[in-house]
Image (spheres, rainbow, N blue to C red):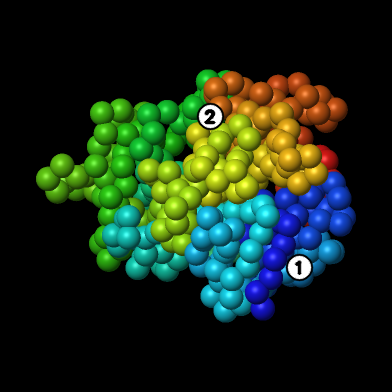
Amino acid sequence: MSSHHQVLIIGGGTAGIMAAAQLLKKNKKYSIGLIEPADTHYYQPAWTLVGAGTYNFDKTAKPMASVMPRGVHWIKDYATAFDPEKNTVSTKSSGDHTYDYLVVAPGLVYDYSLVPGLGEAMDKGVVCSVYTDPKHAWNVIKNFKGGTALFTQPTTPIKCGGAPQKIMYLAESHFRKSGVRKQSNVVFATSGGVIFGIPEIKKTLMEVNTKKDTHLRFGHQLKKIDGENKIAWYALGDNQSEVNSKDIKISKDGDLIGIHYDMLHTAPPSVAPKFIQESPLVNDAKWLDVDQYTMQHKKYSNIFGLGDVCGLPTAKTGAAIRKQVPVAVDNISLLIEHAKKGNMAYNGYSSCPLVTDYGKMVLAEFDYDGNFTPDPKLKRMLISDSSKEHWRLWILKKYMLPYLYWNKMLKGKDV
Ligand SMILES: Cc1cc2nc3c(=O)[nH]c(=O)nc-3n(C[C@H](O)[C@H](O)[C@H](O)COP(=O)(O)OP(=O)(O)OC[C@H]3O[C@@H](n4cnc5c(N)ncnc54)[C@H](O)[C@@H]3O)c2cc1C
C-alpha cells in the first residue's frame, strides 16, 4: 500500500503524464509513483470541436493505462493531503506515500457555488458547456431555433480562456447553415474589457465579430443564473462597454442586469481542487504557489507544480504545459543527480488556438509580458502570419495537434 518514490507525481492529466514520460527519458532508472484515480485520460482541447459537431467525442478519450508510461508505478487513488515537512502525501485508500521530489499536477475543478443557479441548470435543457458535456453542447447548438444565444464566462481563471468564444464563432456559423441566424442575436458577455489581451489577435477577432454581427458586452461579471426564467445575471464593472448593440431583453435587479437567453453556453467557475486549497502549498488566491520561471514551489524546494493548478500569470492550457514540463524535469533531474537546479526558465508561453469558423483558425501564442510569440515552425506549414485566419491552422488544430498530443507529447518526445 504505502510506498516511497524518488519522484511522486499527483495527477495523470496532460502535465502529470508528460512529466513522468520526460523524467524516464532522462533516466529510466528513476523510481516514479503517479497518483491518479481516473480510468480515462481526455484530450480536452478537441472538446470545442465536439461541441460544434465536427469531432468525435470518443476520439478524445483513451484508457489511462494506455498513456501511463511503462516503468511508472501507478497508484490508482486520490491524493487527499500533504505533509511537506515529512515529504508525505496521504491518499483516500492506499495510505501515505513518501517522496524525495514531488510534482503536483491535479488540474483544476469547477466550483458552482461561485455562480448560484448555474450548477442546477448546467448540461440540462438549453444550458451547456464544452468544458463539462461537449455532446450536450452540440445538441443545444444543433437544436437552437432562434432568439438570444448567449455565450459567456465566469470571472475566475478558466482553462483555455479562448474556448468560450471559439464555440460562439462555430455556433454562429452553424446557425447560418441551419437557417436560424436571421431570427437570432448572438451575444458574448465577459468580465474582461477586450476580446483578447494580445493586440495582434484582438484586431483579427474584432474583425471576425464585425463580420459575424455579434453583440459584445464587456465588463459583465457573471453573478447568478436563473435557469427557470432563462436569465443570466451580471454586475457591471468600470470597464463596461458594448459593441454592436442589439435589441435583446434585459431585466434589472438593483445593481444587477439580467440578460434573457434562449440558449446559454458558459465555462464553469474554476478553482484549485479542495485538497490543494486546504494545503500549506497555496498562495493567497488559493492556487499552487510556484515560482513562475522554475516551476519550483516557493517554500518547499523539493516540490514542483505543473499545469492548471499553478497560480501563474498566464493562460491555463496544454500548450503552456508543453513548455513548463521540460523546465521542471530538468530541475528535478539535476537536483537528483547533482544536487543543484538547472537554469532553464519558463517564460509564460501559452497558446490559444482560436477557431473562428469551420475551416478557419487564428493562433494566439504569447508570454508573461503579453508579447505575440508565434512558433517559427509555423513557417514550415506555410503560415506566414498566425494572427490572421488561416485554413492550415484549422488542419493543425483538428488533425495535427491531437496526433502530436497522443503520439509525441504524452510519450515525452520533443515537439
Ligand atoms: C473545452 C476545453 C478546451 C481547451 N482547449 C485547449 C486548447 O485549444 N489548447 C490547449 O493547449 N489547451 C486547451 N485546453 C486546456 C487543457 O486541456 C488543460 O490546460 C490541460 O489538460 C491541463 O492539464 P493538467 O494536467 O493540469 O490537468 P488535467 O489534464 O485536467 O489533469 C488533471 C488530472 O489530475 C487528476 N486528479 C484530480 N484530482 C486528483 C487527486 N486528488 N489525486 C490524484 N489525481 C487527481 C485528474 O483525474 C486528472 O487526470 C482546453 C480545455 C478545455 C476543457
Helix, strand or loop under label 1: strand
User: How far across and down, in percent of the image, does residue 136 sit?
Assistant: 52, 65
- Residue at image x 37%, y 60%? 112
Q: Which mark is residue 73?
A: 1
Disc 1 under 8 Å from ligand 1? The reply is no
Q: Nearer the viewer, residue 180 or 276?
A: 276
In this view, which residue lies farthest toward the left? Answer: 254
Query: Mark 2 sits on what residue?
Result: 205
Looking at marks 2 and 1 on the same chain, the residue that comes earlier in the sequence is marked by: 1
Q: Which quadrant of the render holds ligand 1?
A: bottom right
User: How far across and down, in percent of the image, does residue 155 sit?
Assistant: 37, 43
Residue 297: tell me if it is visible.
Answer: yes
- Residue at image x 75%, y 60%? 32
Residue 138: tell me if it is visible.
Answer: no
Q: Are marks 2 and 1 in contact (CB under 8 Å)?
A: no
Q: Give the amino acid type for the residue marked by disc 2 in the picture.
A: Leu
The 10 Å Cα crowd at callout 1, few under 14, some 14 to 19, many 20 or more, is some
Q: Residue 70 lies in what quarter of the image?
A: bottom right
In-image side of 124 versus 170 (left or right): left
Helix, strand or loop under label 2: helix
In-image side of 387 versus 222 (left or right): right
Q: Give the amino acid type for the residue marked by disc 1 in the picture.
A: His
Q: Which mark is residue 332?
A: none
User: How far across and down, in percent of the image, does residue 366 sit?
Assistant: 61, 28
The 10 Å Cα crowd at callout 2, few under 14, some 14 to 19, many 20 or more, is many
Q: Nearer the viewer, residue 341 or 395?
A: 341
- Residue at image x 83%, y 53%? 24
Quadrant occupied by the N terminus: bottom right
Q: Is residue 184 above or below residue 29?
A: above
- Residue at image x 31%, y 42%? 221
Label 2 – label 1 distance at C-alpha:
45 Å
User: How far across and down, in percent of the image, does residue 276 sit?
Assistant: 47, 57
